[in-house]
Structures are given as structure tokens and as C-alpha cells.
Image: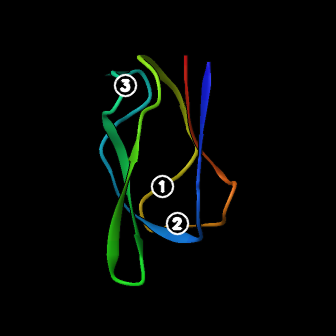
């Protein structure tokens, strides 16, 4: 199981996966926006999205949980 966490304060601009989706290492899960830059959040493992903790438009802080991959 892998926890994907925010590396910075940012807005959740776009969510590209849903709970139950299969993902592979390197797939883009979410796109964050900070200071007019788009930052992709990538999967670190192969697996299934067990939990998606964010919604589009959310403001997240460094260390916040974005998703859990099983």
C-alpha cells in the first residue's frame, strides 16, 4: 500500500483517476496548481486507487494525503 502525499501547498486543479481505477507506476493521478504552474502528482506503485482524499478546487497543504494505492 502506498500513500501519495502533497509535496507543497497547492490547489487541486484536476483529478484524472477515481477510486477503483487501476494505475501503473508513473501514471498521473492529480494535477496541482501553484503560482500558475501545473504540477502532476504521479503514482509511485502499480495498483488500484483505494482512496481518493481530495476534490477539484481543494487547497491542500504540504504532507496532506492525496490518495492511497493498494
Q: Which mark is residue 25?
A: 3
User: Is 49 drawn above or below residue 15 in the view shown?
Assistant: above
Q: Secondary structure at mark 2?
A: loop
Provide residue 30's location: percent of width, then percent of height.
Answer: 38, 49
Mark 2 residue crowding within 10 angstroms, few (<14) / some (14–19) / many (20+): few
The residue that label 1 is drawn on is: 55
Seen at 67% across and 54% down, the residue is 64
User: Is 65 drawn above or below residue 23 in the view shown?
Assistant: below
Q: Could you tell which of marks 3 and 1 lies nearer the N-terminus?
A: 3
Q: Nearer the viewer, residue 53 or 40?
A: 40
Q: Nearer the viewer, residue 40 or 70?
A: 40
Q: Could you tell which of marks 3 and 2 lies nearer the N-terminus?
A: 3
CB-based contact (under 8 Å), mark 3 and mark 2: no
The residue that label 2 is drawn on is: 58
Q: Quadrant of the N terminus?
A: top right
Provide residue 53's location: percent of width, then percent of height.
Answer: 58, 44
Query: Comparing marks 3 and 1, which lies closer to the viewer?
Result: 3
Seen at 34% across and 82% down, the residue is 36
Q: Quadrant of the C terminus?
A: top right
CB-based contact (under 8 Å), mark 2 and mark 1: yes
User: Is 43 drawn above or below residue 40 in the view shown?
Assistant: above
The CA distance from mark 3 to mark 2 is 25 Å
Provide residue 34's location: percent of width, then percent of height.
Answer: 44, 76
Amino acid at each position: 500500500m502506498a500513500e501519495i502525499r502533497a509535496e507543497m501547498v497547492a490547489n487541486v486543479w484536476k483529478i484524472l483517476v477515481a477510486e477503483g481505477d487501476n494505475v501503473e507506476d508513473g501514471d498521473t493521478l492529480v494535477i496541482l496548481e501553484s503560482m500558475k504552474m501545473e504540477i502532476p502528482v504521479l503514482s509511485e506503485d502499480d495498483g488500484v486507487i483505494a482512496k481518493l482524499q481530495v476534490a477539484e478546487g481543494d487547497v491542500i497543504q504540504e504532507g496532506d494525503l492525496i490518495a492511497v494505492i493498494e
